[in-house]
Amino acid sequence: MPQDVVKDLVAPPGAFRAPLEYSDAPVRDDWLASFNDAALSGLIDEALAQNPNLASAAAVRDQAMASVRLARSTLLPRIGALGGISRDEGSTRFEELVSLELQASWEIDLWGRQRASVDAAQRDAQATALEYAFLRQSLAALVAQAWFSAIVAGEQVAIDRERLMTESSTAEATARRSAAGVGTPIDDDFAQANVATAREALAASEYAFEESVRALEILLGRYPGAELSVAFSLPDLPASPPIGLPADLLQRRPDLVSAEERVAAAFLRTESRRLARLPSVTIGASAGVLFNPAEEVWSIAAQVFAPLFTGGEIDAQIEIASAQQRQAMADYIALAIDAFAEAESSLAAARFLDRRAEELGTAVARFASANRIAEERYEAGVLTIFELNQVRQDYFNARSRQLVVRLEQYLRRIDLHLALGGSFDDRSALDHADGPGVGPGYGRERSPGQEQPQ
């Protein structure tokens, strides 16, 4: 199997089906800096240092690195020492013998079976390190999305407080009109009901705000006490980023490169199982010395083992490895399709969200004007409280919908950066696979001229 055969498993188009305003220039890293939010940057740093799930993933990565060293040890000779003391009481004399012996054994990797197994472990370790890198990127994205969600939840609380103040003011005016004999009892009841409804809406939004803060604190590894201070408004939404080409995702996204490494490991394990049919050669040697009396002994031998009958064990292992190989390839295809779908969906969402935001901006401005006029006419006795309530409800509902769409724009922007494989800082997302025994760009390294077995 050629080194890059997995690239032939999927056939991405030459360009995204995105609107023309997006540039197909290469994807840039450091998307976090584009929001120019120092508080958010600090929170992401805290999450990377304190999040327990990320710490667990780092431990899994380190275990995978150690497993590679363990697999490599099978290529080296085994050397051990054996010592002992014995007594011999004969008829004529008493002897005490002290012995020391060195023993060594080494299985010669004639056919490359062990090397294939070691290379498979190396690929699996690379895949694990890349999965850690993708989790790191995902955590940064989740913190950013939770931060923006908490800000918008706070803005909704402010809207509901304003609505409560407005309804309370209207209820007082209605009470004065009823006392003056202008209004009717139903007007007063309706106005008080609106106040109660506004209080209920405020309680709901305050709870939602606390829950959003708790969700953010959990990501940070803090106690979820809803005590984190949140900004009062969203930062400016950055300009649309360059999106590159669909094929770039296969090389940029750590989860896709990880899946590629899993395919390579599966092919190597299959090759290792097939080579197990061939004879193996093991060389053994020992050298020792006996004290009292002095005597040196040594030996060397070679053993050849050919698996003539194993009860179907080797064939079963080959079948298992072959099935795992097919599974890894299918998983790679499915993940690639999902990655393309995530990118296309985020791009399409941005286009429609921009249209919705523009229309809602117009609607809110118009409703604000209508609400102001309706309040003046109600005070003048031209409108009924029911007519005022309809205009007011439309106004505040439009403002809430506008908040939802604004938040969705920010959430989808973060989704887009993650889908395209852009890193939140100025290092490539793949470079964050670094770990013990792992160099920069670990998941992308290839041995010159190395090919995977067929």
Image: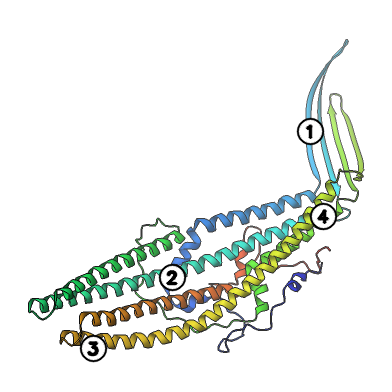
Q: Which residue is drawn at 63% across and 75% down?
A: 340
Q: Which of marks 2 and 3 is in front?
A: 3
Left-right relation of 216 to 71: left
Q: Which residue is drawn at 54% across and 82% down?
A: 241
Q: Quadrant of residue 166?
A: bottom left
Left-right relation of 137 to 177: right
- Disc 2 to disc 3, C-alpha distance: 41 Å
Residue 421 visible in image: no
Q: Nearer the viewer, mark 2 or mark 4?
A: 4
Q: Are marks 3 and 4 in contact (CB under 8 Å)?
A: no
Left-right relation of 229 to 137: left
- Disc 4 to disc 1, C-alpha distance: 33 Å
Q: Are marks 1 and 2 in contact (CB under 8 Å)?
A: no
The secondary structure type at the circle numbered 1 is: strand
Q: Name the residue under label 4.
A: 272
Q: Which residue is drawn at 52% across and 79% down?
A: 349
Q: Which of 162 and 136 is in front in this view?
A: 162
- Disc 1 to disc 2, C-alpha distance: 62 Å
Q: Quadrant of residue 265?
A: bottom right
Q: Name the residue under label 3.
A: 373
Amino acid, disc 1:
Leu
- Disc 3 to disc 4, C-alpha distance: 81 Å
The secondary structure type at the circle numbered 3 is: helix
Amino acid, disc 4:
Ser
